[in-house]
Image (cartoon, rainbow, N blue to C red):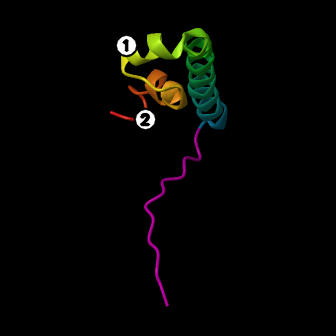
Amino acid sequence: MSSNTTNITLSHGNGSANFTAWFSRAFEAYVTKRSRTGQIQALEALSDADLAKLGVRRDQIVQYVFRDVYWS
C-alpha cells in the first residue's frame, strides 16, 4: 500500500483573479512559443554545412532553439 501526501492550498477568495493570472501566464507561454517558430523555420532552411558551423544537427534544431527553457 502506498500513501501520498500533498500540500495543496485552495483559495476560496477571488476566483476571477486566479483565473486571470492563470490565463495571463498561459497566454505569455503561447506567445513565447510562437515567437520561436520563426527561429526554427530559419534554422531548418539552413544547409547541413551551415548548421554544422553552429554545432547543431538537423534533428537537434528544436532543442537548440529551446535550450534556455528545457536544456540548461
Tag of residue 70: 2
Q: Residue at x 57, y 24 (%)?
A: 29
Q: Amino acid at mark 1?
A: Lys
Residue extending farthest left: 72
Q: Residue at x 46, y 74 (%)?
A: 4
Q: Amino acid at mark 2?
A: Tyr
Is 54 above or below relative to 22? above
Q: Quadrant of residue 50?
A: top left
Is 10 above or below relative to 56? below
Magenta-colored stretch includes residue 17: no
**In what quadrant of the picture does the C terminus appear?**
top left
Residue extending farthest front: 49
Label 1: which residue? Answer: 53
**Dot 1: what SS?**
helix
**Dot 2: what SS?**
loop
Tell me: 35 left or right of 53. Answer: right
Q: Which region is colored magenta?
A: 1-13
x and y, in percent, of residue 14 in the image: 61, 35
Question: What secondary structure do most residues of the magenta stretch adopt?
Answer: loop
Label 2 – label 1 distance at C-alpha: 23 Å
x and y, in percent, of residue 49 in the image: 46, 13
Tell which of 28 and 18 is nearer to you.
Answer: 28
Tag of residue 65: none
